[in-house]
Image (spheres, rainbow, N blue to C red):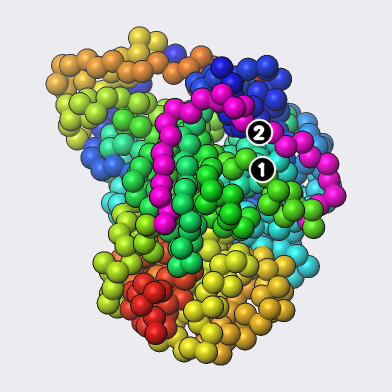
Amino acid sequence: MKILKGKVHKYDKDNIDTDVIIPGPYLKIHDHKELAKHAMEGLDPNFSDKISEGDFLLTGKNFGCGSSREHAPIALHEVGIRAILSPSFARIFYRNAVDGGYLLPIEIDKDIVIKISDQDILEIDLKENKITNLTKNETYSIKPFPELISKIINAGGLLNFRI
Amino acid sequence: MGMNITEKILARASGKSIVSPDDVVIANIDKVMMHDVSGPGVIKVFSEWEKKGIKLEHVWDPDKVWISEDHFVPASDTISANNISLLSNWSKKYNIKKHYKYGLGQYGICHTLSHEEGLILPGEAYVGGDSHTNTSGAIGALAVGLGHTDIAYVLMNGKIWFKVPETLLFKLSGKKPEHIMAKDIILKIIGDIGTDGANYKTMQFTGEVVENLVMEERLTLTNMTTEAGAKNGIIEPDNTTYEYLSSRTTEDYYPILGDRDAEYSEIYTYEIEKLEPTIAKPFSPQNITVARELQGIELDKAYIGSCTGAKLEDLRMAAKILKGKKVRIRTEVLPAAQSIYLKAVNEGLMNIFIEAGAVVGPPTCGACCGAHMGVLAKDEICISTTNRNFPGRMGHIESKTYLASPLVVAASAISGKIVDPRDVK
């Protein structure tokens, strides 16, 4: 599993729901690039301008709650987000992110959320299950993924994998 | 150690004699559903597979697949019309017989068709491409919502992975007062445990109140488990279930009940006798209070619709309040399925709604998800029988939605302000 390096965008809010990540009227759109224009529109209208390919989101607990729309991880992937760090994820968002191969939902302790600041540069190492904060020169441990989920992640999603 | 109903269904579906919470299992699926929002995403996954050279001449079992048109129907614009046409061509190509099309007999919101048509049966493992798939758990099935990659995988392979959930058991005891509906009960529970209170977990309902609830009210309980983050909501089947299904299906089914010594990670007891009509304020289903606390809040609109709040029983309760009265704010009534619409017409409910001044529309998810058919303007305030009130859920990001039972919504419609149904003269 390769090491991911990117910049953090911190939205320290619990329960960021899928209606905020990609609002209902866009559910009829299935063009990924078009969806990306509206990513996080309900929370930060300038979101897509701030993100570069490979960046990370850092959020409060229960990220992605609400609807099962796969449009949510698709839109975030398409703007460039490769991992989301949160104390917890809503279950459908979690499995959509993994099974669709869009991005990594990484569960971290609440006190790590406090330690990481907006714009910090992180390295995420899934082999060692640790995060290195290159800006602050700190390391944090992350909960390993269950075996099957690791295999799906390594394959890039269920498109390329048979369970 | 015994297993509860969810564990027993997952054990049966994965061919294991025993499963425990946190086990990862691969379950064989009995039924799968997609609609006009998840379907086009599924079709896109199919085309990705085809690009990789994987041949997709047929799905795993066309008889176990069903499709509904519900979110953007009747087609709200050309994009929606194209999605519906895409779905129709796909179901024809893959020989899917159960495709409920608007304007062609029975159709409606997927989670309503699942029980109205007896599509999901006790003991089954059912997945749907929509978060409120949990609804069908009231029938005694394992009913779980998935995204479109997972649904595509099930369509091809007939199976999918699950982590066996822990189960929270909710015992609803006492006698339910007449002014209380299942909606009040589930809002109260979500208020207590929060929108992530059951994340990755099962919410199972039992007790005297559940035993005495009609099937459609039970379905409101399981429907809203999604709002607490639950993987599934479930109620063990009983005579109410079997009777409900007897007029809807001739298919054989094999009910599963939990063992007597089943384990639950937590047990909650609720005395329903003392419960007050309950409302979730903007902007979260967990943001609850009692209706009387909000008395006098001025409203712009009342919405009676969705898989949560436009079943026949919901319409009956709303009509009971609206009979002979006039609404003071815009009021919309959208039955959840064509069959419910017809029953409501035959019972005279539609006359009551129209005479009260409400507009009656066709079955659709409509404005519940901010799609079309009555979305909210900036600063508009709505009271609604639906399931979510996140920012922008029903329209403009600066609109507000209060979630309540059909009784509270109807009472508020005639008062123009939030009101407890007991206080309507």
Residues at marks 1 and 2 touching, judged by CB atoms closer than 8 Å: yes
Q: For residue B251: magenta?
A: yes
Q: What residue is at 42 percent from the left and 70 percent from the top?
A: B408
Mark 1 is on which residue type?
Pro
Within the image, what quadrant is residue B382 found in? bottom left
Q: CA distance from mark 1 to mark 2?
A: 7 Å
Dot 2 falls on a residue whose secondary structure is loop
Marked residue chain, label 2: B
**Residue B353 position within the rendered picture, expressed as x and y whole percent measured from the top left:** 56, 83
Q: Answer with left or right where residue A120 lies relative to residue B110.
A: left
**Residue B128 position within the rendered picture, expressed as x and y whole percent measured from the top left:** 63, 44
Within the image, what quadrant is residue B237 found in? top right
Q: Residues within 10 Å of mark 1 (few under 14, many from 20)?
A: many
- Tell me the magenta residue range: B248-273
Nearer-the-camera pick, A48 or B100: B100
Q: What residue is at 63 percent from the left and 17 percent from the top?
A: B18
- Location of residue B85 with respect to A129 vertically, above or below: below
Q: What residue is at 28 percent from the left and 15 percent from the top?
A: A141
Q: What residue is at 22 percent from the left and 15 percent from the top?
A: A139
Q: Residue furthest front?
A: B174
